[in-house]
Amino acid sequence: MKPVRVGICGLGTVGGGTFNVLTRNADDIARRAGRPIVIEQVAHRSPNPDCDLTGIKTTQDVFEVANNPDVDVLVELIGGYDVARELVLTAIQNGKHVVTANKALIAVHGNEIFAAAHEAGVIVAFEAAVAGGIPVIKSLREGLGANRIEWVAGIINGTGNYILTHMRDEGRAFEDVLAEAQALGYAEADPTFDVEGIDAAHKLTILASIAYGVPLQFEKAFTEGISRVTAEDVEQADNLGYVIKHLGISKRTDQGLELRVHPTLIPKERLLANVHGVKNAIAVMGDAVGPTLYYGAGAGAEPTASSVVADILDVARDIATDHHYRVPYLAFSGIDEDVSQLPILPMEEIISAYYLRLLAVDRPGVLARVATILAEQGISIEALIQKEATEGELVPIILMTHRTREQHMNEAIRQIEAMADIAGPVTRIRVESLDEQE
């Protein structure tokens, strides 16, 4: 059969890995695809010493690849929003299929891109956009296609998981472990996207859209980072039988969908609690299959390239298929007219249990007043830890509450922080059991 010709835009970590996997495993890939897959052109700003480009057309202009009539599939690995969006839309306009690992692009501009691809009859594949080498998108979109998905919860940022793992194992402060992660190349010089949850929110937006058949709505995702989590929080969580993880969580409720990223206490015995270092893992609850877990390398050159090349394989298999009969981009048929319009719930409407840490003056009646404030908001206390204080010390008070609505907790915290005997802000971390009964 006629070879499928690929143009790779970006030859950094993932682009280099994709190039090398395609060339190294060319024979096996051709057997799986039923036709050869060849690299027609590569666009890159600077050479990658790990890639032998001998005999390959190269350019520094990514749009040259998008306009190259000999390229069947454009592989977008440049990252970012604006240039990547223009590049992908140009390729689609020129009748090219697209494979991308760009979660930000899909989360923010995916609705527009998928509509354009549907109109042009081309494929946009994006397995590598979520969790690197873990085939969670294919599993959620196809393998779990018989299920009504109840919830998705995942560790989908390796940098944050590395930091929280080492804070727990070694009792170190956030800033200390972050600096180590930057030195090792796990965190960027500006780590905001990772530690403040933006990267995870991009990925969660994609997972939720596939799980529930709703449009991509990144702007409605609640995002909270891990920079305020202290070594003491990690220690106290451990004492209470929990582990702190930076989770992306989406749940289906009668009122709508939850879409949130934040530090979360989860019981030690849960599988997600035992995912360490830079690894990723996503738990999915389906009504028929029950709980399933997808675990592996969430980043890296060849793990991510594994997903990129798998997408290229899918395109090669489906390239001659009428686009009306292909698996839909976001799992459900229809781009606008057929997708569910379940609303994304505001965070104030979310129901969760809570871990609270506050510093109080060691004085009679302070704890009683805190308990009264919580009770007035309908919040009951499940567990309490209060350390002994020496004269003049502020006493750390740790509380675990039963499940309550976020807006009630917000009001309780506002009133507690206004107390004269409470020093500084109250630390609040949400608690999830991730139990199949929820």
Image (cartoon, rainbow, N blue to C red):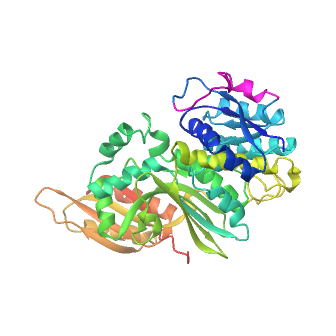
- The residue that appears at 39% across and 69% down in the rendered structure is 268
Residue 206, image x, y percentages: 65, 52
- 31 vs 150, nearest the viewer: 31
Q: In the image, is residue 61 part of the stretch drawn in magenta?
A: yes
- The residue that appears at 67% across and 26% down in the rendered structure is 55
| Image: 61 above or below 208 | above
| Image: 428 above or below 302 | below
Please indicate whether residue 337 sits to the left or right of residue 377 in the image.
Answer: right
Magenta-drawn stretch, dominant element (helix, strand or loop):
loop
| Image: 337 above or below 70 | below
Q: For residue 392, what is the image quadrant?
A: bottom left
Is any part of residue 368 visible from this angle? no
Q: In the image, is residue 428 part of the stretch drawn in magenta?
A: no
- The residue that appears at 37% across and 67% down in the rendered structure is 242
Judged from this view, the residue extending furthest toward the front is 27
Residue 111, image x, y percentages: 74, 45
Please indicate whether residue 82 sits to the left or right of residue 51 in the image.
Answer: right
Looking at the figure, which quarter contains the N terminus?
top right
Judged from this view, the residue extending furthest toward the left is 391
Which region is colored magenta?
50-69
Residue 70, image x, y percentages: 81, 30
Looking at the figure, which quarter contains the C terminus?
bottom right
Please indicate whether residue 114 sits to the left or right of residue 209 in the image.
Answer: right
Residue 141, image x, y percentages: 70, 60
- In this rendering, the count of numbered labels is 0
| Image: 48 above or below 20 | above
